[in-house]
Amino acid sequence: MGAKLHILPPSANSHCCLATLRELGIENIEIVNAYGKTREPEFLEMNPCHTCPTLEFGDGVAIWESCAIMRYLCRSSSNGDKLYPKDLQAAARIDMACDWRQTSYYPCIPDIGYVVFGMELSDEDAQKQFKKLIDEHFKTLTEVFLKDSKFVYSDTPTIADLAIAPSLTFIKARSKFWDAVPKEVKDYHTRVLQNFAHTKENFDMLDTMCTEYSGPGADLEPLE
């Protein structure tokens, strides 16, 4: 059995791995739609954390967490340095940005955007998390990672940009939050996604879900 990449089609975490796969021209990994299957015994045996994306190998081994998968894809591909540098210091800076994404930036996103998946979320928590993005994390993105380059520590997009930018789309679920996002962050979001046109269908899927969301909290005002 060959390797399989289990994804959720509207998931930003899946989108970054799909974009990496396509950008590097990797064709020997099967894409599997895992929607509705991540809590089934067969999936849990493979990945007890029941998350997507998950990269399954034919020898019973699987890895999950999007940044880990992207690094594996780059390291195993002859042209992987297109998205993940071979230079150790440059790679470490990309790793640092990916870790920041996982531990600092992304934890703010679920309370804001997961309403599109039908989750009942606190408006107060959404406002607090968005304020944290505005007051702290967007400044790190624009004033540190993008200070001297169009992409994260790079003049061309890397896996760090694929980790960060697609998930910004979730903020569109709260239209007034999106209005308050700094222009330089919006421009970065557009710039990254436009560089991966082969994943546009997936990017657009999440964008449509968010921009057309009209349920509870859609018109929530951000905190001053």
Image (cartoon, rainbow, N blue to C red):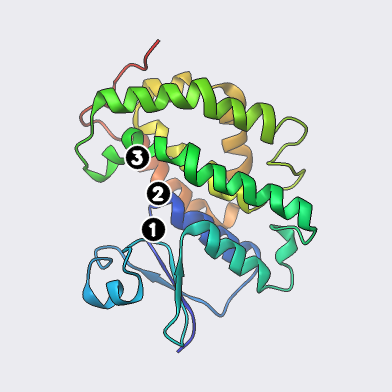
Which element carries disc 3, helix, strand or loop?
A: helix
Which element carries disc 1, helix, strand or loop?
A: loop
Looking at the rendered structure, the kind of residue marked 1 is Pro
**Residue 110, visible in the rendered structure:** yes
Q: Nearer the viewer, mark 2 or mark 3?
A: 3
Residue at horizontal 32 percent and vertical 67 percent from the top? 34
Residue annotated with mark 1: 9
Residue annotated with mark 2: 205
Q: Position of residue 137 (x, y in %)?
A: 53, 29
Mark 2 nearby-residue class (10 Å; few <14, some 14–19, many ≥20): some
Tell me if 184 is positioned left or right of 10 in this view.
right
Q: Nearer the viewer, mark 2 or mark 1?
A: 1
* Residue toward you, 9 or 125: 125
* Circles 3 and 1: CB atoms closer than 8 Å: no
* Residue toward you, 69 or 172: 69
**Residue 157, visible in the rendered structure:** no
- Mark with earlier residue (2, 3): 3
Q: How many numbered marks appear?
A: 3
Tell me if 91 is positioned left or right of 38 in this view.
right
* Circles 2 and 1: CB atoms closer than 8 Å: yes
Which element carries disc 2, helix, strand or loop?
A: helix
Separation of disc 2 and disc 3 at Cα? 17 Å
Residue at horizontal 36 percent and vertical 60 percent from the top? 8
Residue at horizontal 67 percent and vertical 69 percent from the top? 75
- Mark with earlier residue (3, 1): 1
Q: Residue furthest top?
A: 224
Quadrant of res 178: top left
Looking at the rendered structure, the kind of residue marked 2 is Met
Q: Quadrant of the N terminus?
A: bottom left
Tell me if 57 is positioned left or right of 48 in this view.
right
